[in-house]
Image (spheres, grey):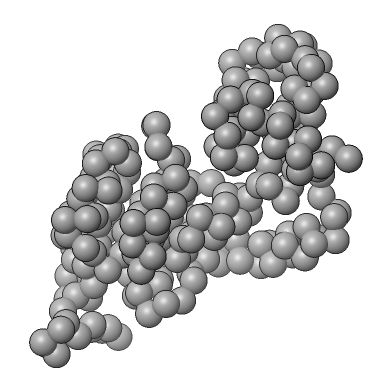
Amino acid sequence: MTTAFPDRGGSVRPLRVVLVDDHEMVVAGIKAMLVPFQGRIRVVGEAIGADRAVEVVASLIPDIVLCDVRMHGVSGLDLCRKLRERDPNCKVVLLSVYDDEQYLFQALRAGASGYLLKQITSDELVRQLELAHTGATVIDSALAGRAVDTAARLQSDEFWPGARHGLTHRESEVLELVVAGLSNRGVAARLVVSDETVKSHLRAIYRKLQVNDRSGAVATALREGIFL
């Protein structure tokens, strides 16, 4: 079934979409997927990396921004927050390879209109973007059922400390050791992982707690009583 959206003059037009990813090949692939659906959806712009995305979106004012979650520098989650702060009516749908409820919860907290997985078919992607444009929150079917169960368990405190803040179990372990005063090398030795792995976990912790450094993460953990 073809879905059309009226413009201000009353005529119908395709849904206008801007693509954001830090890999040109991914953008090209999504554009190719959508070519057969040009009567329903049209890519009107693209940004390679989040840095240019704000400018592109501001100039084109698309119906939907379809954005990768994980990008170098500014993440898709951060970009979503920034776009929504500039324009609360901006609809952002995040596309990810990560089949992880915690990313989904972070996306919804950031104001995203949806969270879809990259293995989605082209016709399903078009259908979900059309639904998002109508105001629905779209969630990949592979995640939806698990997300409901996880949300219920989070409310019952059945998860690890930090889960409410979007931290994975391993990230919570890292943060707890940092709060206890261990260095990166000490955390790595305790968890039997590399120093680089610890640094990667810390970067994720900072992003999820919305802090800039180690001291900010410790302060947030203490203030929020994460490990009490």
Marker count (numbered): 0
Question: How far from the left and from the top, in percent, is residue 206?
Answer: 59, 33
> Residue visible at 40% across and 72% down?
132
Quadrant (top left/top right/bottom left/bottom right) for the N terminus:
bottom left
In depth, the one of 136 and 214 nearer the eye is: 214
Horizontal placement of 139 versus 219: left or right? left
Name the residue: 21% across, 47% down. 55
In the image, 100 versus 173, the foreground residue is 173
In the drawing, does residue 9 fall left or right of residue 164? left
Residue 113 vs 211, above or below: the answer is below
Say whether residue 38 is left or right of residue 91: left
Does residue 16 show up?
yes
Seen at 78% across and 25% down, the residue is 179
Q: Nearer the viewer, residue 40 or 184?
A: 184
x and y, in percent, of residue 143 in the image: 60, 61
Q: Is residue 154 left or right of residue 201?
A: right
What percent of the width, then of the height, locates residue 198? 65, 20
Position of the C terminus by quadrant: top right
Is residue 215 positioned above or below 46 on the image? Answer: above
Residue shown at 46% from the left, 48% from the top: 77
Eyeballing the image, is 73 above or below 178? below
Rendering coords of residue 84 (x, y %): 39, 58
